[in-house]
Image: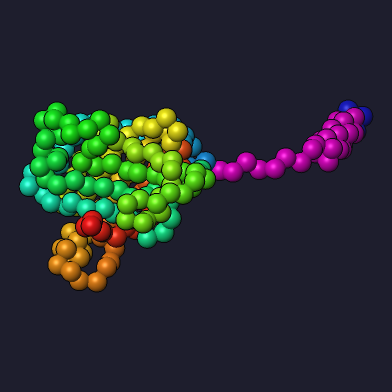
Amino acid sequence: MSTRLLSASAAVLAAALVLTSCNKPTQEPSAPVSPGQPTAIAPPPEPVAPAAPAVQLTGFFHQPGLNQFGYYFAKAPIQFGNFKLRGLHLGAPEDFANYEKGQRISPNYAPIMLEFDDVTSPLRENELGQPYHEVSRRVLPNAYKVTAEQVSFRGQDDVLGQVSFEGQIDAKALERVHAGEAEETVLTGALTAMGQTLNRAFVWFGGD
């Protein structure tokens, strides 16, 4: 009798285990992790280095003895609002030397300056019969640097605002033009006024 009870109990227990196994929810296996190799942690991003501040042009410098005297005219128009660039003027070496010593010929002259015409103003004629606009603005430098290869200019005007020019001179081309060869580009640069920057090429004119 006892043997039959034990057999019946064992059968019931086995059936219960099978039923429990069938009702157990399926679980996705986890990805194995290699022993001794913990999951890598991404390093924090490198700090971004601040941009180097732009070098502010200050003072007056002209390469001693350098003669680039003349007028430089843009090959394509440069205009800001109603004001069109007439030209960039560079003086003689002695003009630069005197200016840098504090000797001023006139409050309206500097050995490097930019002239703009108001194209909406009336036209007049000069003593040579050449037309010019009645209203113009001459921008004198607050700072400049002029070398055989570089022309840098900073100025301020009540209408045009901050005016700057950064240019590169082609010394070989300037020599050829001085020697009387055909007209060609001698200066390229960027002129900024009224918050706008225009890139242009320039030719040289020695004056009348």
The answer to whether residue 57 shows anywhere in this view is: no
- Residue occupying image coordinates x 30% and y 48%: 88
| Residue 138 drawn at (x, y percent) | 34, 39
The N terminus - image quarter: top right
Frontmost residue, 171 versus 41: 171
Question: Does residue 160 appear left or right of residue 59 in this picture?
Answer: right
The answer to whether residue 47 shows anywhere in this view is: yes
- Residue occupying image coordinates x 18% and y 34%: 105
* Residue farthest bottom in this picture: 182
Is residue 139 depicted above or below 132 in this figure? above
Question: Does residue 121 appear left or right of residue 204 in this picture?
Answer: right
- Residue occupying image coordinates x 29% and y 63%: 185
- Residue occupying image coordinates x 14% and y 40%: 96
Principal secondary structure, stretch drawn in magenta: helix
Frontmost residue, 4 versus 9: 9
Q: Which residues are magenta?
A: 5-32
Residue 136, by quadrant, is top left
Residue 57, by quadrant, is top left
| Residue 77 drawn at (x, y percent) | 43, 55
The C terminus - image quarter: bottom left
| Residue 201 drawn at (x, y percent) | 34, 58
Is residue 9 within the magenta segment? yes
Colour setup of the view: rainbow
State the count of labels. 0
Question: Does residue 189 appear left or right of residue 109 in this picture?
Answer: right
| Residue 99 drawn at (x, y percent) | 15, 34
Is residue 199 within the magenta segment? no
